[in-house]
Image: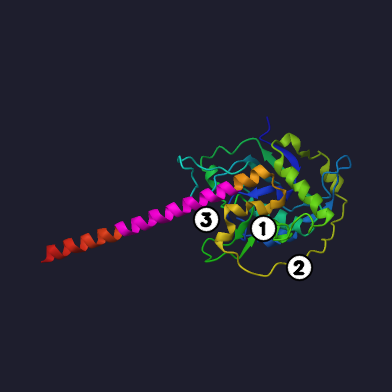
Amino acid sequence: MPLYEEKFLSPFAIRFSQARIRPTFQDGRLVEKSLAQVEAVHWPLEDSDAYDVMLRAPFPPISIIRWRPKLREQDGTSIVNEDGSTLLGDACWFTFDNRRLYCLQAAAAKHWPRRAACIVHVMRDLPTSKCTPRKFRTTDSGCSVAISRRNDPVPRAIWSWAQATHCGTSGATPEATTEAGRTSLGAILADSAREDWDELVDVPVDLQQRIGELAALEPLPQPPPLPASMPSQSSRAPVSASAALGAWQWPQDQQHQHHHRGHHQQNHRQQRGQQHQHQHVERQLEQQLYSHRQLNYHS
């Protein structure tokens, strides 16, 4: 039995498993240089109209898995229910290859609203390493990722495909988007909702022959970028996950669940703040008691 299946999937339907990526790969290559080498070609499958273009990348396909991650605070701590159980997010497609996913999403954004697909390896299960589940450190359900080195005081940039394509900004309603944009968003939602790899498009064995002679497509004109500003960490809270797929397309029951979760998180943060305040007062009392004992000792 194979460990994975090779399929096509929209890179916008895949989430980041971590909150931060380095601007270089492990071998020292710049991530932005690899991004510049990702090309888009015409969709090569004549018997399928699922996508408009296919991304041809200079690196191996990313591995993905269907997973329900832990919901986390901005400091990375897990969010728990009143009974102490861990709150889990919705099941989504996640990857551990976060830098490559960034390259694929950024390349696909240049061709918006074309429906872009990339080759993925869909894993049957998580790797056997015990530390693998701990790698899910995203604090906004994988909708964005910070680009920075470990010791950078602030991120160099925060990437979100919804913001790059203006699909997650205010006013991005069905009336404000083009027909092609609504079609692309619908395709992304459909890919995101597919629960099993059997529902994804297969990669043919002769794919390289089909795309070998295809010329790279020119990127499409994109709307002007948003005003340059460094988002704060608070802007990457789990509640922002709705923006990545367009809050206007969320079913009513998911909107209610999302609102309830946000209200619970607010109460949880208030309780943690009160707990930290009590601990601070206790430490002050302990220091005063210690100073009093030292004074009595020396006297």
Q: What crowding class fits label 1: few (fewer than 14 Cα within 10 Å), some (14-19), or many (20 or more)?
A: many
Residue 176 figure quarter: bottom right
Residue count near mark 3 (Cα–Cα under 10 Å), binned few <14, some 14–19, many ≥20 = some
Residue at far top of view: 1
Q: Residue at x 48, y 51 (%)?
A: 267
Q: Is residue 136 visible?
A: no
Q: Which kind of residue does numbered mark 1 sit on? A: Ser
Residue to which mark 3 is pinned? 74
In this view, 225 is above or below 11: below
Measuring from the top left, give residue 38's x and y in whole percent: 76, 56
**Separation of marks 2 and 3 at Cα, in angstroms:** 30 Å
Of the image marks 2 and 3, the number of the one nearer the N terminus: 3
Residue 4 or 146: which is nearer the viewer?
Answer: 146
State which quarter of the image contains the N terminus: top right
Asked if residue 63 is positioned above or below residue 164 in the image, the reply reads above
Q: What stretch is highlighted in magenta?
A: 259-282
Question: What is the spatial separation of the Cα atoms under label 2 and label 1, in whole angstroms?
Answer: 15 Å
Q: What residue type is labelled 2?
A: Pro
Q: Decide if residue 211 is on the left or right side of residue 89.
A: right
First in sequence, mark 3 or 1: give its number: 3
SS of the residue at dot 3? loop
Q: Is residue 67 above or below residue 280?
A: above
Q: 187 or 117: nearer the eye? A: 187
Residue at the left extreme? 299
Q: Which residue is drawn at 51% across and 63% down?
A: 151
Residue beneath label 1, please? 160
Q: Which residue is the site of mark 2?
A: 224
The prevailing secondary structure element of the residues shown in magenta is helix
In this orientation, which residue lies closer to the viewer: 145 or 171? 171
- Residue 299: image quadrant is bottom left
Question: Label 1's element?
Answer: loop
Residue 174: where, in percent of width, then height? 78, 54
